[in-house]
């Protein structure tokens, strides 16, 4: 009789411990599902809504598979085949281009009625002096790379420092 009780106790202990381990293992997946659902409760566009719905479905499926004790495939660390990645990007950009051609009525291009004011670094006579002083390198007209853009930005900053010193010494 004692051995039967001991066997039942060990079996129950084993059953409940595996269940709690499964809960711990599946908790990150459940948290991810809750995060996606929280994003759905905030405002979004229709395109974003479709994306969030797909994410929610995927997260729920992974969580449910984990709860049922099935193996959940983890993302591989490899970037994958670049050819497939490029094809996916082209497909996405094609669908994005189709959906983004919604007409905006004239007179409401922005979501604000506030005045847009763009100010330059210098005003008045100092601006005129700066425009005479600054010599933009030819390759800075249309930078082809980030390195060229960085060079142009640094060159302009260096010329601005020289201009400030010259303008104060006048």
Image (tube, rainbow, N blue to C red):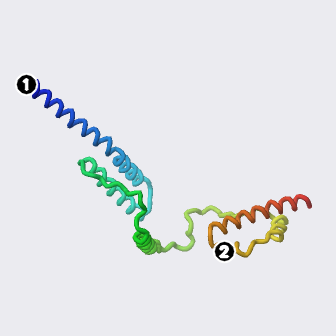
Residue at the extreme left of the image, as rendered: 1
SS category of the residue bearing label 2: loop
How many marks on residues? 2
Give the residue at x 73% y 75%: 138
Q: Is residue 67 above or below residue 17?
A: below
Q: Which mark is residue 1?
A: 1
* Residue 151, horizontal then vertical, whole percent: 70, 66
SS category of the residue bearing label 1: loop
Quadrant containing the N terminus is: top left
Nearest the viewer among 135 and 38 is 135
Nearest the viewer among 32 and 152 is 152
Asked whether the viewer can see residue 143, the reply is: yes
Which of the 4 image quarters holds residue 19? top left
Quadrant containing the C terminus is: bottom right
From the viewer's perspective, is the residue at label 2 or at label 1 nearer?
1
Which of the 4 image quarters holds residue 129? bottom right
């Amino acid at each position: 009789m004692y051995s039967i009780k001991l066997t039942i106790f060990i079996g129950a202990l084993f059953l409940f411990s595996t269940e709690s381990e499964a809960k711990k293992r599946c908790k990150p997946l459940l948290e991810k599902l809750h995060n996606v659902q929280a994003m759905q409760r905030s405002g979004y566009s229709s395109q974003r809504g479709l994306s969030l719905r797909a994410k929610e479905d995927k997260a729920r499926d992974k969580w449910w598979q984990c709860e049922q004790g099935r193996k959940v495939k983890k993302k591989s660390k490899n970037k994958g085949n670049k050819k497939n990645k490029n094809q996916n990007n082209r497909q996405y950009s094609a669908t994005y281009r189709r959906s983004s051609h919604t007409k905006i009525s004239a007179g409401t291009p922005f979501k604000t009625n506030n005045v847009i004011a763009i100010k330059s670094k210098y005003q008045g006579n100092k601006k005129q002096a700066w425009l005479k002083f600054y010599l933009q390198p030819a390759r800075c007209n249309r930078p082809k790379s980030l390195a060229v853009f960085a060079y142009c930005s640094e060159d302009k900053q260096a010329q601005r420092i020289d201009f400030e010193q010259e303008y104060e010494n006048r």
